[in-house]
Amino acid sequence: MKNRGITVFISILCLTLVLASPAMAAQKPVTKTRAGANYDPITVNAPSDINLGVMTVNGRTPGNNIGSVETEASDFSVIVKDLKSPYQGYMINTTTGNPLSIELYISNEEHGIYYAADVGFEFDNVKSLPFYVYQDVTSGDAPGSYSIIITFTGTTK
Amino acid sequence: MKKFLAICLVLAMVLTIAIPTAVSAGSSDNANVGGTVLAKPGLSSITNGNGTPNLTGGGPKDITDVEINGTGFSTDSTANVTINVSPVTGITTKDIVVTATKVTATFTLAAGTGTPAGDRTVTVTQGGVTSTDTVTFTVGGYINVTAPQAITLGVINLLGTVTGSSTAGNAGAVDTNETTYSVSAKDANAGGNSGHMVSGGNALTNELMIKAASGDGYSQSDSTHGITYSSTTTLPVYVSQQGNANDQAGSYSITITFTGSY
């Protein structure tokens, strides 16, 4: 009788642990299953490549494009930033590997707040990803071709 | 019992550890941002459409096919290649066409002193970087003179004096890009009758007198005298002819030549 009582108690404990898990407690319906985990899938389509063309020395060269998100989730975000190291946030000379002297700045609004590309910004619950950049070039920057990869990382919550 | 308890604990741990991987999904994609910083172009020479580096005045006028030769010019449409002229007064550039070794453009010169004569220095800017090299050309000086309207003195009394003038809208005019210049007005005929009105082979006895302003005194109009205007764009003229008892009847005339110089 004692053993049975302990068994029931432990069984209740196990069930309690399972039911207390956040995933199981979520109220939204689970629509997809992958590798045994339940979640809403998200697919991020980064904006097409942006060619700034000739970047004006002692001037500011802007560019923009639009990306998108595909998901059934109601709560999701997309973080936008440069992930590389070193020279995070800087356009890099494709020949020498040297960075420009000023970081690339990025934004989701043409006339909004621009963030250094190493800091980046976040889209919340929007499926259109307008992406604006500008690059300042100084007279000390060496001639050449420069590039940077900005990563768009989407996550459902 | 112990075995069952162990299984339950392990199961609970497994469930607990598995939870974080089940609450979210992720996806990432990359956007590449690229651009180019241009080098300074090199300049070697500049020629106009005639192959010389000089641009003649007489504007407003367009001088087409001015060619700036060099190296490293960018043909990228975003390079914003510009031609910089110094001093730029009166000169604008348009219709710029760029190849790797040549920038071709039309230079437009403003009229008159809007484009002063003199040497100009040229540089080329692309993508915000300006050539260290320079090339030069010269805007040539020019002066175009329009003589006053013809003056008809009417009947000249043998013992009297007649006067005439061409002023205001009938005055002569000067078009020049020089700031310091002069215009002489006199009979260009240097012969014996210089300064005299003539009719066929006959000349009036007295010389035609001429002046540039009503308040001035008259000067002889012959080829060694005449009057001089200094750096003025309007050329009023006043003349006076005195008759003489020995003058023959007839219709007399004289040509006064206005000559600009700088």
Image (cartoon, coloured by chain):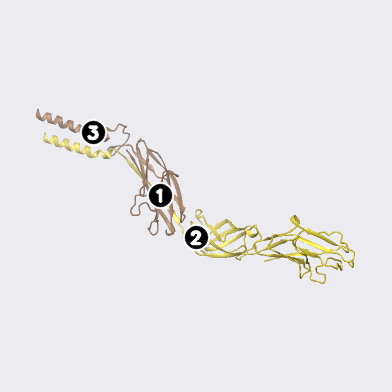
Chain colours: A brown, B yellow
**Residue A30 falls in which quadrant of the image?**
top left
Q: Image point 41% across, 55% down: which residue?
A: A146
Comparing labels 1 and 3, the label whose residue is closer to the camera: 1
Element on which disc 2 rests: strand
In whole angstroms, how far apart are the C-alphas of marks 2 and 3?
68 Å
Question: Residue flagged by tag 2: what amino acid is it?
Answer: Thr
A14 over A118 or under it: above or below? above
Describe residue B74's horizontal placement relative to residue B28 as left or right: right
Give residue B21's position: percent from left, percent from top.
Answer: 27, 40
Q: Image point 12% across, 31% down: which residue?
A: A6
Residue at which label 2 appears: B130
Describe residue B221's horizontal placement relative to residue B13 as left or right: right
Q: Quadrant of the C terminus of chain A?
A: top left
Residue at which label 3 appears: A20
Q: Residues within 10 Å of mark 3 (few under 14, many from 20)?
A: few
Q: Chain of mark 3?
A: A
In whole angstroms, how far apart are the C-alphas of marks 1 and 3?
43 Å
Give residue B222's position: percent from left, percent from top.
Answer: 79, 68
User: Outermost residue toward the left?
Assistant: A1
User: Outermost residue toward the bottom?
Assistant: B192
